[in-house]
Image (tube, grey):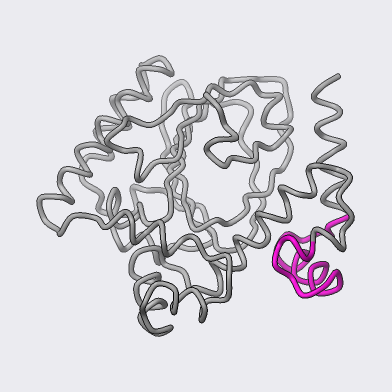
């Protein structure tokens, strides 16, 4: 599975855990980015990772010998997370706009915290978790996708068809929100209302996610000067870039580059 084509920046330390990656069912491709499974690896200490916001969300399953815990994570800030080494893990990465379709709009209010899904009245989730426990990883992926397909079918029966082109257009903010609204032929207020109802975020947040994501991609290339990255990522200058990047990621661009390139070097040796 080509992860780069899916726009995934894989944590270097996560790559060491040898997760298996799965493409979504074709009927789920508009709503699910990917699914990955990480095996049980006792006697190891998994590092704390940073989960960067991109308007998507994760449905995360943790398997021990006798129990399954399903958590939901929708972050608009960068948050730390450590995967337990004494459990198997499976994560469904949802695309922006998928939460109201595959789960429920109420999940949009659960921001920047990992919450157990059984706290919500989500039909079928308890039976799903019970069915998953004895299965192998690939069977779990198939079972979860069948459940997601049933959730999609239920949404389609009760609601108007999802305008996936509109969701994609709303997500592609590479200019200011005001200019983006004009290009879409709507007012700034309409743009904000639609993004909040579909994705639970504002146009300013989406614009920031895109700029930080672009900067992270360029920093991973290693040699591009920070001043050039600032301009290429849509910031006014290097100072503006450094301040907003640090605010969004809790480290400076130089620190991020040094840490990531060191991790990549360690995983290749």
Residue 35 against residue 155 in the figure, above or below? above
Quadrant the C terminus occupies? top right
Task: Label the magenta part by its dominant secondary structure.
Answer: helix
Q: Find the magenta span and give its range.
A: 230-254
Closer to us: 217 or 86: 217
Q: Quadrant of residue 152?
A: top left
Closer to us: 161 or 229: 229
Decide if residue 11 is on the left or right side of residue 153.
right
Closer to us: 207 or 185: 185
On whether residue 242 falls in the magenta region, the answer is: yes
Residue at 34% x, 24% y is 132
Q: Residue 163 appears at what percent x and percent y?
A: 27, 57
Decide if residue 51 is on the left or right side of residue 229.
left
Q: What count of labels does the image hold? A: 0
Q: Residue 45 appears at what percent x and percent y?
A: 74, 30
Q: Residue 231 appears at what percent x and percent y?
A: 77, 65
């Amino acid at each position: 599975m080509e992860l780069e084509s899916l726009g995934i920046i894989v944590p270097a330390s996560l790559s060491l855990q040898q997760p298996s990656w799965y493409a979504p069912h074709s009927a789920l491709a508009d709503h699910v980015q990917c699914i990955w499974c990480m095996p049980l690896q006792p006697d190891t200490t998994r590092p704390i990772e940073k989960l960067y916001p991109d308007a998507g969300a994760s449905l995360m399953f943790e398997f021990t010998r006798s129990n399954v815990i399903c958590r939901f994570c929708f972050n608009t800030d960068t948050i730390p997370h450590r995967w337990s080494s004494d459990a198997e893990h499976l994560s469904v990465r949802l695309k922006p706009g998928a939460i109201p379709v595959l789960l429920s709009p109420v999940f949009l209010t659960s921001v920047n915290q990992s919450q157990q899904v059984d706290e919500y009245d989500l039909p079928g989730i308890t039976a799903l978790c019970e069915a998953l426990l004895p299965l192998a990883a690939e069977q779990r992926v198939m079972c979860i996708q069948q459940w997601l397909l049933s959730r999609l079918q239920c949404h389609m029966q009760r609601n108007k068809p999802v305008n996936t082109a509109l969701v994609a257009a709303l997500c592609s903010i590479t200019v200011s929100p005001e200019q983006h609204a004009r290009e879409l032929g709507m007012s700034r207020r309409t743009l904000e209302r639609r993004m909040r109802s579909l994705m639970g975020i504002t146009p300013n947040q989406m614009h920031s996610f895109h700029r930080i994501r672009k900067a992270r991609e360029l920093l991973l290339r290693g040699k591009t000067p920070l001043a050039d990255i600032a301009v290429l990522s849509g910031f006014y200058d290097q100072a503006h870039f450094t301040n907003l990047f640090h605010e969004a990621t809790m480290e400076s661009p130089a620190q991020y580059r040094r840490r990531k390139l060191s991790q990549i070097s360690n995983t290749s040796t």
